[in-house]
Amino acid sequence: MKLRELTEVLKADILVENHGPDEDIPLGGAADLMSDVLAFGAAGMALLTGLTNPQVVRTAEMAGINVIVLVRDKNAPPETIELARELEITLIRTSYTMYEACGRLFSAGLPGLGVVKIRNDSW
Amino acid sequence: MTHGDMTVQEITKVQELIYTTRVEDVMATDVIIVDPSMTVADVRALMKEKHISGAPVAENRKIVGIVTMTDIIRAMEEGMLYEPVTTAMTTQVKTVLKDSVVAEVANSLGIKGFSRLPVVDHDGMLVGIVTTGTLIKSLLRQMDRSFQKNEAEKLHTYRASHIFQDIVSDDTSLLLRFVVDDKDFSNAGKASSMIKRALQRLVVNPQIVRRVAVAVYEAEMNLVIHTDVGGEILVDIRKDKLSISAVDHGPGIKDLKQVLQPGYSTAPEWIRDMGFGAGMGLANIKRVSDMMKLISEPGGGTRLDLVFNLDHSQ
């Protein structure tokens, strides 16, 4: 899915724009636990989250995520906006809830990771 | 890389810029404004003096029309040289909002054939003007800036990646030290960010960089969340392996077996509210590292040692 379609499907505002509308988004994921993002985040994934603190941007940086979608019409604090600018991460805001934002994107054809397993010895 | 590839890359860069740059960043703000009280003859003189071929007509920054050389010539042909400019101007003015993206302007200027677009703020007040000239000038300036940034990063990478060839010893290693403050949530992750950047400049395989970044970030968050004194992260980079230690003199860990259980957490509520402390940190670190060792005792601080094998075949 292109970034343009993602913002249309979510009727989203772009808060920090670091990628053009033709940027390819290969898959999506949603989490409010940053350790889950670090465990299951894939490079290039669009991350949907209800958290707005700067650590969301840091976590995205570590996981190789370029696009973050803030759900439930949450406004990002200035530190978060600032860090997203610095780390060249695109920050988007939608008024849909996490459930509905995910549902809309999935129906529109944006896949997730499929079945994941977490084991002590797996990578 | 062939010259052809370069051209394609530059075109992509222009496309990217026109979608990410806002009109207010490319517009000229020193707009020459025509006052509605001026006559056609006054405007003709103004255009000649300022070397312009058109200008918005506005009263107190509120646009009432736009007048071009074509309008002036027509008015002169019709013998209206000393009539007010408001009789000769075009009143249907295409304007653009200052925070719209440049792509919108490029479309109007390029395809729809407008030569200039007055820029307005949300109250409809004139704040600037864009023409093909101002647009191209600022795009070129921005391309130059991002080109320079890229080149600077390439130079850093070139210098860093040759360190193991340039510095000769029986066993060369590069030691990076980072101090992590406790409870400093807004700065948490800075050390990890710098470590990630260092490894990228050393041209470590991107997959390994990502694993290291995840591990070191979890370790850094542990220092921020669980110690009351902060700690230190040491990164020892050798040609074939990377050893990382996160050391603190905090309260230590009572039951080492328990903290290694996925989901076990002693993090306070406010940390959980921020998306951390789910008890997955050490499990994540263990999964991404090639070796993990955790040493701790109550009151004696904690030491986490990690090893990553570096694959230099890539």
Image (tube, grey):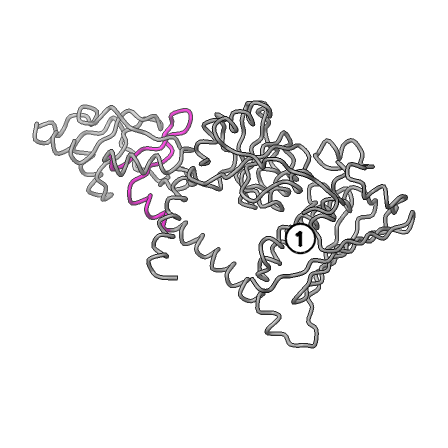
Span shown in magenta: B114-140
Q: Amino acid type of disc 1?
A: Val
Horizontal and vertical percent position of residue A46: 55, 37
Q: Determine crowd level at label 1: few under 14, some 14-19, many 20+ residues with C-alpha closer than 10 A.
A: many
Q: Nearer the viewer, residue B75 or B251?
A: B251
Compared across the picture, whether A52 is left or right of B263 comes to left
Q: What residue sits right under mark 1 in the picture? A: B212
Horizontal and vertical percent position of residue B271: 75, 35
- Quarter of the rendering occupied by the C terminus of chain B: bottom right
Figure check: B239 above or below B210: below
Q: Which residue corresponds to the image point at 39% horizontal and 51% vertical from the top-left?
A: B141
Rendered image quadrant of residue B46: top left
Figure check: A55 above or below B216: above
Rendered image quadrant of residue B168: bottom right
Q: Nearer the viewer, residue B93 or B294?
A: B294
Compared across the picture, whether B95 is left or right of A95 comes to left
In what element is the residue under mark 1? helix
Label count reads: 1
- Quarter of the rendering occupied by the N terminus of chain B: bottom left
Horizontal and vertical percent position of residue B303: 82, 53
Figure check: A85 above or below B89: below
Compared across the picture, whether B136 is left or right of B251 comes to left
Q: Which residue corresponds to the image point at 70% horizontal and 73% vertical from the top-left?
A: B171
Q: Tell whether position B137 is magenta.
A: yes
Horizontal and vertical percent position of residue B213: 65, 50
**Tag 1, which chain?**
B
Q: Tell whether position B217 is magenta.
A: no
